[in-house]
Image (cartoon, rainbow, N blue to C red):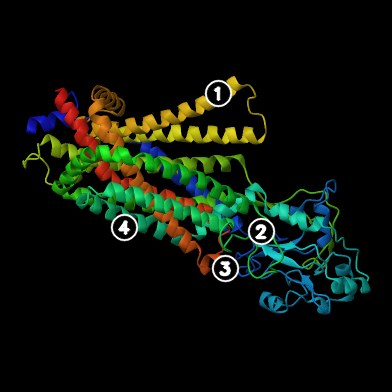
């Protein structure tokens, strides 16, 4: 037994091959440097809240003013908003004068309301007093300042149009108050344009793709308690429960898994229907807070949730049909599946640490994800606040210099450099690679522990470590980290390439420049199919390569070659067990992830995530994040059974070869 174990756990030269960890060290240094740039330049408040006329972020604490309670961006000059909606005016909305408020102002029913600039200079008011006065100190102005205000040059501006809070921006409603307009004309105020363009200008600004993406990222950040519960703790509990049940109820668990999968995917689809407004009255709305029920605003988030509901319908139909189709296969292969799971259960029963080992990579990934998410929020909001270079012919009264200034009436915007996009892409790729790497390390440790058990023939021996899991971890850290890193990098690279090509395909399709001839279309779709096949093949080869790394101690490429040769020469032995077993385990992982998504929907439906500050614009990204996290956690724990079965099969095949 000792000779067999030594032979199969060492290289051909009798020594363990060394592991070069320089690549992993360089990667983590790059991740830390990249994240530090985000922490230095970013401000997650920018993802939701806009900039005022001083370049301050609404909802933040600044040197001159504490705007933490003032989260809403309000455009004070309606004529600038109107001009920005005209095609050839040359005026852009980002240069319109904006201010941060606590709530959206509404016109008075019997007089004229005003919104004045932040109190400074000769205006001896605190910010709290200014808020209590409803932002209106027009009555205290000198005749000179009243005159400039009537010319829409500030410091006070009339409230003519009602407005509604749409994603923390006050959007004008194209229904000017007749009372306010009458008072404005009696004061000989400047002419105010009341065309419907004033409504569309702000609406188009709110619905730009970059604004929607920022809100989606902010949704994930604001829903961090949901991620912890539904993406971390719940899948941990469900995965361990599933492992315990499949150990004691082997015969019925395949059927339970199939029925649970169908029920969960239908339930998740129904929740998408509810948020899309197809069922009930719980559809998402871009309007925050109380508003006129007859006033409706459309947003990209609504279109996206409709698309997601449609896609989930298609996935649900296909999944239910496929689950019905595999029922006969499960009946035919129940005995084989039962035998393989019993063997895995026996191994887990002998090597007790296997059942709790996934908690270690789970904890590592949890810490990494918390750091990664915090850095991602800052990276997506990084950039420098700079004054725009505009040719707008406008003037505004400056309370500090005590005169009308026409030199600095341009607005502020966040300047993004090309390297920020590169940093975000690297950060996303780093997350995927780190996830694949931790999963690969977990799989290799499990394979090494099971291989120790197999080559010892299940006997107790002083040469077999008392705790094979920790011994396998030691071997991985000392000798095989480089091989595991290469394998996980290949999977990450292929998956990222496929994602980029798919994004290019969608953009070409949107630009209507797809290949026209049927031959080119066939080649195009064939290439997509081949790339997906390559990805699935590499994932399968990698898993078996990790097993051979643990068994033989070879490098990644030699272990992949050995595993492929064994699979090809024993395809009939391996195929029957692997196909059905992998399907059931895959459905089990999907059950855990779907349950995580379902509970995420329930948590996001509470009042906390519908209030003004913590409002989730759409449950789409938080639910998808919980879905993905649930699948990763399930992969870690289900890997105990999965890798045990595969390791026993490959060890037996190699044993038979020899």
- The circle on residue 237 is 4
**Lateral position of residue 95 relative to residue 208, left or right:** right
Locate residue 635, reporting x and y percent. Answer: 33, 45
Residue 637 visible from this viewpoint: no
* Residue matched to label 2: 50
Image position of 9 with respect to 44: above or below:
above
Label 1's element?
A: helix
Q: Earlier in the sequence, mark 3 or mark 2?
A: 2
* Residue matched to label 1: 522
Q: Nearer the viewer, mark 4 or mark 2?
A: 4
Q: State if disc 1 and disc 2 touch (CB < 8 Å).
A: no
In space, the residues marked 4 and 2 are separated at their CA atoms by 41 Å
* Residue matched to label 3: 611
Q: Where does the C terminus fall, quadrant-wise? A: top left
Q: Earlier in the sequence, mark 4 or mark 2?
A: 2
Q: Earlier in the sequence, mark 4 or mark 1?
A: 4
């Amino acid at each position: 037994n000792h000779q067999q174990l030594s032979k199969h756990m060492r290289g051909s030269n009798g020594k363990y091959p060394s592991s070069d960890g320089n690549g992993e060290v360089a990667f983590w240094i790059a991740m830390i440097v990249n994240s530090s740039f985000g922490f230095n330049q970013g401000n997650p408040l920018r993802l939701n809240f806009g900039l005022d006329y001083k370049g301050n972020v609404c909802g933040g604490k600044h040197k001159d003013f504490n705007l933490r309670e003032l989260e809403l961006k309000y455009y004070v000059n309606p004529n600038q908003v109107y001009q920005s909606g005209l095609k050839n005016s040359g005026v852009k909305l980002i240069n319109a004068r904006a201010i941060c408020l606590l709530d959206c102002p509404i016109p008075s029913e019997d007089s004229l309301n005003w919104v004045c600039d932040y109190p400074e200079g000769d205006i001896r008011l605190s910010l709290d007093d200014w808020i209590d006065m409803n932002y209106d100190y027009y009555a205290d102005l000198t005749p000179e300042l009243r005159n400039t205000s009537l010319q829409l040059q500030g410091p006070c501006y009339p409230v003519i149009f009602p407005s509604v809070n749409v994603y923390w921006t006050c959007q004008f409603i194209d229904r000017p108050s007749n009372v306010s307009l009458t008072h404005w004309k009696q004061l000989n105020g400047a002419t105010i344009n009341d065309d419907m363009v004033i409504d569309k200008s702000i609406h188009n600004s709110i619905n730009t793709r970059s604004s929607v993406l920022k809100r989606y990222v902010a949704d994930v950040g604001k829903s961090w308690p949901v991620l912890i519960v539904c993406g971390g703790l719940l899948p941990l509990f469900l995965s361990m429960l599933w492992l315990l049940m499949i150990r004691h109820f082997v015969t019925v668990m395949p059927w339970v898994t199939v029925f649970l999968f169908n029920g969960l995917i239908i339930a998740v689809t129904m929740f998408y229907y509810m948020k899309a407004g197809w069922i009930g009255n719980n559809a998402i709305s871009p309007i925050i807070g109380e508003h006129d029920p007859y006033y409706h605003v459309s947003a990209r988030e609504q279109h996206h949730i409709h698309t997601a509901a449609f896609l989930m319908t298609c996935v649900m139909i296909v999944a239910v049909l496929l689950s019905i189709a595999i029922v006969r296969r499960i009946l035919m292969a129940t005995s084989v599946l039962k035998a393989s799971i019993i063997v895995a259960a026996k191994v887990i029963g002998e090597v007790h640490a296997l059942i709790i080992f996934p908690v270690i990579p789970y904890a590592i990934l949890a810490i990494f994800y918390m750091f990664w998410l915090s850095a991602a929020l800052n990276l997506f909001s990084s950039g420098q606040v700079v004054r725009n270079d505009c040719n707008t012919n406008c003037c505004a009264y400056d309370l500090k210099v005590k005169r009308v200034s026409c030199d600095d009436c341009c607005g502020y915007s966040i300047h993004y450099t090309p390297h920020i996009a590169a940093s975000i892409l690297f950060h996303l790729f780093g997350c995927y690679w780190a996830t694949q790497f931790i999963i690969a390390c977990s799989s290799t440790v499990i394979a090494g522990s099971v291989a120790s058990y197999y080559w010892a023939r299940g006997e107790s021996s002083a040469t077999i470590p008392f705790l094979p899991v920790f011994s396998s971890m030691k071997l991985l850290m000392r000798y095989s980290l480089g091989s595991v890193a290469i394998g996980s990098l290949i999977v990450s690279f292929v998956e990222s390439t496929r994602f980029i090509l798919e994004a290019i395909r969608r953009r070409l399709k949107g630009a209507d420049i797809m290949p026209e001839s049927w031959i080119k279309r066939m080649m195009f779709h064939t290439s997509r199919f081949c790339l997906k096949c390559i990805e699935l093949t590499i994932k399968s080869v990698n898993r078996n390569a990790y097993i051979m790394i643990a068994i033989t101690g070879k490098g990644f490429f030699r272990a992949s070659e050995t595993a492929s040769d064994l699979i090809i020469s024993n395809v009939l032995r391996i195929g029957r067990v692997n196909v059905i077993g992998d399907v059931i385990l895959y459905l089990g992982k999907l059950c855990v992830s779907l349950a995580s998504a379902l509970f995420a929907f329930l948590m996001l439906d509470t009042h906390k995530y519908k209030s003004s500050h913590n409002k989730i614009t759409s449950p789409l990204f938080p639910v998808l994040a919980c879905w993905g996290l649930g699948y990763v956690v399930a992969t870690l724990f289900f890997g105990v059974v999965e890798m045990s079965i595969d390791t026993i099969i490959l060890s037996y095949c190699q044993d038979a070869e020899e």
